[in-house]
Image (tube, rainbow, N blue to C red):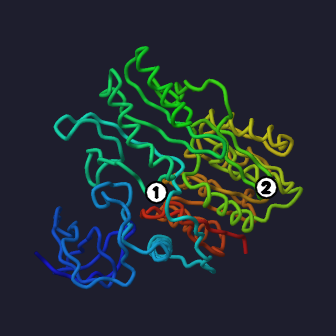
Amino acid sequence: MPIAVIESLDHEGRGVTHVDGKAVFVDGALPGETVEYAVHRSRPTYEQAEVVRVIRASAQRVTPRCAIYGICGGCSMQHLDPVAQAAAKQRVMENAFRHIGKLRPGIIHAAIHGPSWGYRYRARISARLVPSKGGLRIGFHERRSSYIADMRACEVLPPDISALLPRMRELIAGLSVPDRLPQIELAVSDTATALVFRHLVPLNAADRNSLKAFAVEADVQVWLQPGGPETAHRFHPKEGPALAYTLPEFDISMEFRPTDFTQVNVHINRLLIRRAMQLLDPQPGERIADLFCGLGNFSLPIARSGATVVGVEGSDTLVLRALENARRNGLADLTEFHAANLFETTEDSLAALGRLDKLLIDPPREGAIAVVKALGPQQLPARIVYVSCNPATLARDAAVLVHEKGYVLRGAGIANMFPQTSHVESIALFEQP
């Protein structure tokens, strides 16, 4: 088998080396290491491989906690020290700015850190009956596979949820239709934990009694979802606290349903909001837009400063949730929310929002190219804070803001929202000169 020295990490956390002019991406390898590797995919200009043996290890290599690390596709960086993970993600962001945007931030902000384990308060766990492999499996997908990893515990889930996994397997295996419950959606909040069981066929009375008993024993809310996300409904217990997460720094409580989009890592979310408010610096009397606002995660902290916020989101459901959260937190007079497809933003639709002193953008992985291109001469907010979950689309959009719209990229930094994975969350500040 070939042997090589690893040069760097790519944006997926794979080691990168070059052999005979061809790039080789090696799962499980770290920069500076000498490794023996096996190729599992070969193309004319690159190869994909995995480590077979580490001949000379990096000082930053650590022993993975997870018993099925390397099989489960949920994590890809457990073999790298958590502090070094954040540094690697910072380099991914900087490389994207340099190579895609032809830009260099004025300041690289310190990485935002939080707990490295037990942080994942949202997850979608698959379930599949596989008689040839011992029966029911629940877990994340295996790496590079549609198969389900045999997950008996999970180090990135909260410990009490990880401990429930064997009981969840027993529960589903004992139902009348174990092969027709493909998914459990997990939502842990400050007030309660919800498990949403997706079922493709109706459940019988015995199934429902088993689910009720599980809800009581595990002290969780059991929800059922017979169709799309909108069909999810609370099954047992019928009464009790709504799901909610708090933002104590801003005296805000955000209610949500378990199928709503919320950030996976509540600890990093709080710190990310703090950083966003520091960069945006909202002031009483200002009018600020929050685009891709969701249920108001950034909107309400902005409004708490006394600024007026215009939130825009593509989901009617989330717009309704944002309106309700604004009212519950006493911020209805400082907020307005609208549903619109921001991927089809035009100069006219942006101008229809009225005067904007500042702008916050928090798009999905596709980025906000239509928004930044729609910024016209009469609608150039003095300051833009861009929160991103994809360094490539952030760099692409930053190039438009700087090279076409005249903004200056004052600074950027990462938030380690998903420790042990290669996911890069980042935040950047743009200002008019």
Q: Amino acid at mark 1?
A: Val
The quarter of the picture where the N terminus appears is bottom left
Position of residue 186 measured from the top left corner of the image (x, y, whole percent)? 50, 41
Question: Marks 1 and 2: CB-CB under 8 Å?
Answer: no
Residue 113, label in figure: none
Residue 250, label in figure: 2
Tell me the element at label 1.
loop
Q: Residue furthest front?
A: 217
Residue 273 visible (yes or no) = yes
Tell me the element at label 2.
helix
Q: Nearer the viewer, residue 405 or 152?
A: 152
Position of residue 175 measured from the top left corner of the image (x, y, whole percent)? 35, 24
Residue 98 visible (yes or no) = no
Position of residue 344 measured from the top left corner of the image (x, y, whole percent)? 56, 44
The quarter of the picture where the C terminus appears is bottom right
Give the residue number, with chain letter if any, for mark 1.
Answer: 156
Left or right: residue 352 versus residue 422 is right
Q: Residue at x 20, y 68 (%)?
A: 47
Q: Residue furthest right?
A: 285
Q: Residue at x 66, y 75 (%)?
A: 410
Left or right: residue 25 versus residue 303 is left
**Among the 4 quarters of the image, the one containing residue 28:** bottom left
Q: Residue at x 54, y 61 (%)?
A: 417
- State the CA–CA distance, disc 1 to disc 2: 27 Å
Q: Nearer the viewer, residue 432 or 136?
A: 136
Q: Nearer the viewer, residue 164 or 111?
A: 164
Q: Amino acid at mark 2?
A: Phe
**Among the 4 quarters of the image, the one containing residue 179:** top left
Q: Residue at x 57, y 40 (%)?
A: 193
Left or right: residue 112 versus residue 275 is left
Q: Name the N-terminal-most of marks 1 and 2.
A: 1
